[in-house]
Amino acid sequence: MRALGERLALGVIELFRRLPWTGWAAWIAFCVIALLRTDPRRFGATFEAYLLAAQRLAAHGQVYDPANLGDFLYLPVALLVLVPFTGLDPTLAAAITLALYALALTLAVVALTRRLFPQGTPETTALYLAGILLFVNIPAAWFNFKGVQSQIVMTAMMVAAAAAMMRAQWVWASFWLFLAIVLKPLAMVMLLLCAALYPRMRIPLILALVAALALPFAFYDWSYLIELHRAHAVKLWAIASAPPAAWPYQADFTTLLRVIGVVLPAPVSVAVRLAAALATLALAWRVRAHGDLRSSAFAILILSGCYITLFGPRNEFLSFLVVTPAIAALGFVLLAADRLDPRAWLLILCVPVLGMWWTLWIDSWMKPAIILVIYVWLGRMLLVPQRWQEIFDAGANSIKSRTVS
């Protein structure tokens, strides 16, 4: 069995070595097909909800319904970006938005692959890897592209922020995280980790957070916006404290526990989320203290994605795109040192499994279980930061030796 696995692994590597642009060809074809298939019947469940919420904001109407776990739940500032689109045909608005989202994700992944490996790595190598990484993530991106979901651009901005941090570009990293929370506030997880661990990012991130909250007040009545933020807070609490069966599309630690017959009371669920946040911070703190910028920034990116999908409020069964690019990238780093590393291939295999839609019941436990295993493995590695750093050093040294030879 091991020999068969090794032959398959070497066969895949040989395929991409001979046809290095295969990943890019598949990704570009996927983006074109997604754009051509943009239609209200496909994006109606998500993007149309964004447009309707933007229309209600423009009319000073009720944006948030705390009694409805679905509907719009992001910050009011997210709607400022969409208000100009409300005057367009919905299909045209969706196509323009999707094209921008796809471009952002593509450029962010290219930036990440260029930063992950040492200076001197050929640019073509980084581009090849970016194409393969995007190709592997097509299943995770498909339903997000179909619905023109903000998850795409939030992920792109988080990836771009991590890439900037790897080069000590603190202002740019803060700016990308500002855009991330503007478009989807779940990026607050990564923002808080960066603020705690990187002193040079604290003031820019505080300003970013203040700007995200204050921007709508420059355009709309203050009393209306204060009530809007109050309704938003009530809605978020309702989402965070709702039982796992209340939202049929949920897939997180609560739905994983529900499969084995454990249903946590709302206060306990919230306590678990807070405890997990502290544990995630502790892990990131250790690697920040002992690792270089590449390894620590990447640790923050993948830990943020794991936390959002496992412990974030109302994580959905098709929302794992926020972590799959980082999982695939970690697999590539491991492969750089050892082409037959089973950990690398398992990580890469997890990406399409997390991205595909199986059934609501299977997704509700299988995907959180996969993230939990990865999170525990990461925790084991990060508790001894030298082991984590060795992963990146081994990959870098291997690429350097191959480049020199």
Image: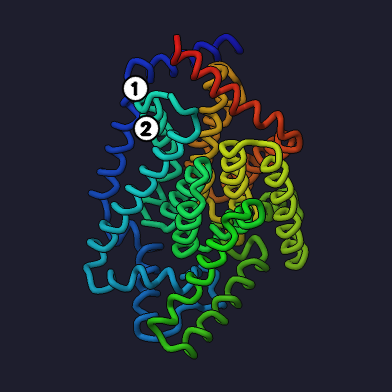
Nearest the viewer among 119 and 331 is 119
Within 10 Å of disc 1 (Cα), the crowding (few <14, some 14-19, many 20+) is: some
* Contact (Cβ within 8 Å) of mark 2 with mark 1: yes
Q: Secondary structure at mark 1?
A: loop
Q: Which quadrant of the figure has residue 24?
A: top left
Q: Residue at x 44, y 63 (%)?
A: 183
Where is residue 158 shown, x and y percent of the image?
A: 49, 50
Where is residue 270 shown, x and y percent of the image?
A: 72, 64
Q: What amino acid is labelled 2 in the image?
A: Gly
Which residue has dot 1 on it?
Answer: 20
Q: Quadrant of the N terminus?
A: top right
Q: Could one spot residue 318 in this view of the protein? A: no
Where is residue 121 shown, x and y percent of the image?
A: 43, 24
Which residue has dot 2 on it?
Answer: 131
Does residue 73 appear to the left or right of 286 in the view shown?
left
Separation of residues labelled 2 and 1 (CA atoms): 9 Å
Does residue 372 appear to the left or right of 18 in the view shown?
right
Where is residue 191 shown, x and y percent of the image?
A: 57, 57
Q: Could one spot residue 265 in this view of the protein? A: yes
The total of numbered circles placed on residues is: 2
Nearest the viewer among 165 and 23 is 165
Within 10 Å of disc 2 (Cα), the crowding (few <14, some 14-19, many 20+) is: many
Q: Residue at x 26, y 66 (%)?
A: 90
Q: Quadrant of the C terminus?
A: top left
Q: Which quadrant of the figure has residue 17?
A: top left
Q: Is 66 drawn above or below residue 386 in the view shown?
A: below
Which of the marked residues, 2 or 1, is nearer the chain's N terminus? 1
Q: What amino acid is labelled 1 in the image?
A: Pro
